[in-house]
Amino acid sequence: MQFSSCTNPSAPATLYTHQEVILVDGSWRWKCRFYWQPPVNISCHSVKYRIMYSFSPLHSPYEVITADRSYYLYAGENAKVNFSVKAINDEGLESSYVNKIIQTDKIESDCELPPQIRNADSFVRISPSTNQLEAVYSCEEGC
């Protein structure tokens, strides 16, 4: 019988968020980034994170396992997002969840969409603080 000295890891430290409005397939969406500090106590060699999130009302929760310490998701306006993350060490032992609930605002902009440029990809966002539109273009190779 092999003995393991692993114990449950501590929960990830503080959970932060960052939100911005971007254009996704012709529709304005909130791009929400959730990020956290690693657990103080991993107790074993490595750690992964189990993420659970749902949108209210009435959406089934999604589950993701990742080694990253951040996660992006896209939400519509006036959405309530319930986000939780916990640490899992290499023995499969888990911490408790750290939770964060955010509410996305109504998306308002008087700006017209920038023109599409042939053979270029664009990234368009609205600055929530100034309500200004920003477009970033990148050309495909050979343009």
Image (cartoon, rainbow, N blue to C red):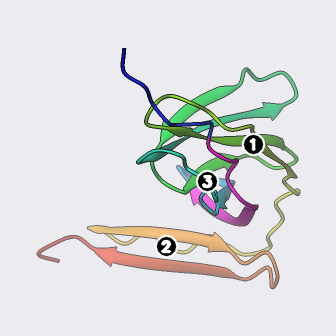
Helix, strand or loop at disc 2?
Answer: loop
Task: Give the amino acid type for the residue marked by disc 1 in the picture.
Answer: Phe
Which of label 2 and label 1 is nearer to you? 1
- Name the outermost residue toward the top: 1
Task: Give the amino acid type for the residue marked by disc 2 in the picture.
Answer: Pro
Residue at the (46%, 44%) spot, across then down? 44
* Helix, strand or loop for the magenta stretch, by majority: strand
3D distance between C-alphas at marks 2 and 1: 35 Å
Tell me, yes or no, whether the highlighted magenta stretch contains residue 18. yes
* Image x and y of residue 98, in percent: 77, 46
Tell me, yes or no, whether the highlighted magenta stretch contains residue 26. no
Q: In terms of depth relative to the viewer, which is nearer, 12 or 121?
A: 12
Residue 57: which quarter of the image?
Answer: top right
* Residue indicated by mark 2: 115
* Residue indicated by mark 3: 41
Residue at the (36%, 21%) spot, across then down? 2
Residue at the (71%, 46%) spot, across then down? 75
Task: Give the amino acid type for the residue marked by disc 3 in the picture.
Answer: Asn
Looking at marks 2 and 1 on the same chain, the residue that comes earlier in the sequence is marked by 1
Magenta region: which residues? 9-23
* Residue indicated by mark 1: 83
Please tell me how crowded label 3 is: few (under 14), some (14-19), or many (20+) other residues with Cα within 10 Å: some
